[in-house]
Amino acid sequence: MFEMPSNRPATRAPSRSLSRSGSRVRLPAVSTLCTAAVAALLAGCSVTPEPFTQDQLRLRVDRNVASLTANQEPVAGEVSLYEAMARALKYNLDYKVAMMEEAVRGQELDRTRFDMLPQLVANAGYNSRSNDSGASSRSLLSGRQSLEPSTSVERQTTAADLSLSWDVLDFGVSYARARQAADQRLISLESRRKVASRMVEDVRTAYWRAVSAERLIAKLVQLSGDVNSALGDSEEIARRRTASPLAALTYQRDLIDVERQIQALQRELVIAKAQLAALMNLAPGTDFKLALPVRTAISTDFCLSGEAMIRTALENRSELRDIAYRLRINERDGTVALLRNLPSLRAFIGTNYDSNSFLYNSNWSGVGVRASWNLLSVFRYPADKRVIEAQTDWLGERERALTMAVMTQVHVSRAQFAFARQSLMTASRYSQVQTGINDQIRSAFKAKQESRQRLIREEMNGLLAEVRYDLAYADMQNAFANVYSSIGLDSFTPEVSSRDSVKDLAGGLQRLWQSRQDVTGAASAASATACTASS
């Protein structure tokens, strides 16, 4: 009976020796296998540049060009001012970029809400080893082995756990970050408002210049032909010496000066329609006609005083709202910096499972609370606070500078509009006087009391007077758009949505702008006079 226990160590010793011997035999093979795996991994991680082929670039170009004007309503009939605005708001790519940026900020805000939720973590794993995990104990008093080697873990085990934890400090930081993300979305909204305001202003300017070009290009071409013909006649007269050389040269100089003015006007007007087409996202070279409105009212006017306009601008300009939101974001950065210096308190609850058969309980639940505090973070807080205070001072100075700039822009835009109205009235009176002169010269020419040279000169002056009147009218409309852009009123309201059709969107824009006393071509001059009197 005493021999069997004494023989157990003798019988187990060879097995341990064989196991160690076997491990020494397999070690070179394992090392070789690991070396091969590492070499294969490094070879797979090597990356070489792969430029696009010419065919791939062509396909990208074709795809991009085809997508520029895809799903757009075709132009049917003449394009009015409000249809041009509607097409810009619906199809302009710069505005779409601003809208997509706002959508991205909205998605980011939705994502930050998940950071405030508790963490629910599920873990699962499998563990296997080539031999038993065993250990023996040694007495600290006698130094002798007190237990024979034993194990309490199987060679192959699986484990899983599901835990729910919530950190109070992380919740506070996540809540502040979510509020900042909400402000970032509002900043993107202000950016979209700014793009829309600038775009509508550009559409208005380009439209009226394009209308002037539509009316006057043919007349300018005709006038250029008349000038060339008159120059030829003048040179013939100079050669025949039927008039004094000084009078002939003076007349030629006047004609050349007129031709130079015609070329300058053509250069300004010829690109206006192309600019309008680009704003409406029409392909270059697209042929369309403009509605030529009847100019029944000489100008537009506003029902707001200068002080009211400045107040409205300071409340509505997107640049000032942008700064206000950034200041609020910076203020919440201070809250985040403070929270990071507080102790962290984490509570958790979970359930666990382990397939190890040696365990008395393979399933158990746990609950607990843990507090931690990074003491070194206290030294970082003063530096964070100084940075936040510096950013607050910087943003505050920017806000004051923008406030002065906005007030100046409102004042300048009002002055420019007043001068544009005066210039338009002057151009109107000049055109009326020139029309009377032309009537008198024609009658005198028929009675052979005036020369043909004088008749040609005055007819050219009449055409130039009409050109100057149309350009003054376009400048007045541009000044009108600048005033509304300077006071920060939206180019469209929530009930005017870019999701509507072009026709519905144009109708909504027309009602909106007419309610803002845009009486050009839509109401009588009496309404403008009443608006002026009320202001």
Image (cartoon, helix red, strand yellow):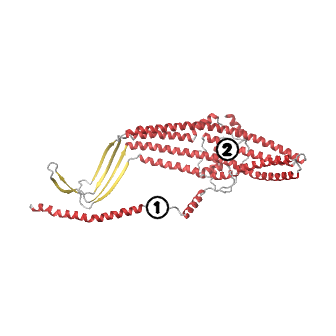
Residue at the spot 15% in from the left edge and 64% down from the top edge: 11
**Quick check: 29 above or below 439?**
below
Report if residue 36 is visible in the image.
yes
Q: Is residue 466 left or right of residue 491?
A: right
Q: Position of residue 451 (x, y in %)?
A: 88, 47
**Quick check: 104 above or below 66?**
above
Residue at the spot 79% in from the left edge and 42% down from the top edge: 432
**Closest to the observer, 294 or 246:** 246
The disc label shown at residue 478, or none = 2
Report if residue 312 is visible in the image.
no
Dot 2 and dot 1 residues touching (CB under 8 Å): no
- The amino acid type of the residue labelled 1 equals Thr
Q: Is residue 342 left or right of residue 129?
A: right
Callout 2: SS: helix
Callout 1: SS: loop
- The amino acid type of the residue labelled 2 equals Asn
Residue at the spot 61% in from the left edge and 39% down from the top edge: 487
Q: Is residue 304 left or right of residue 167?
A: right
Q: Name which quarter of the figure residue 342 lies in.
A: top left
Q: Mark 2: give few (<14), some (14-19) or many (20+) Cα within 10 Å.
A: many
Which tag, 2 or 1, sits closer to the chain's start? 1
Q: Position of residue 79 (x, y in %)?
A: 68, 52
Distance from Cα at disc 2 to Cα at disc 1: 54 Å
**Label 2 vs label 1, nearer the camera:** 1
Q: Is residue 370 left or right of residue 43?
A: left
Q: Position of residue 348 (x, y in %)?
A: 33, 46
The disc label shown at residue 394, or none = none
The residue to which callout 1 is attached is 48
Q: Position of residue 123 (x, y in %)?
A: 34, 54
Which quarter of the figure is the C terminus placed in? top right
**Closest to the observer, 2 or 268:** 268
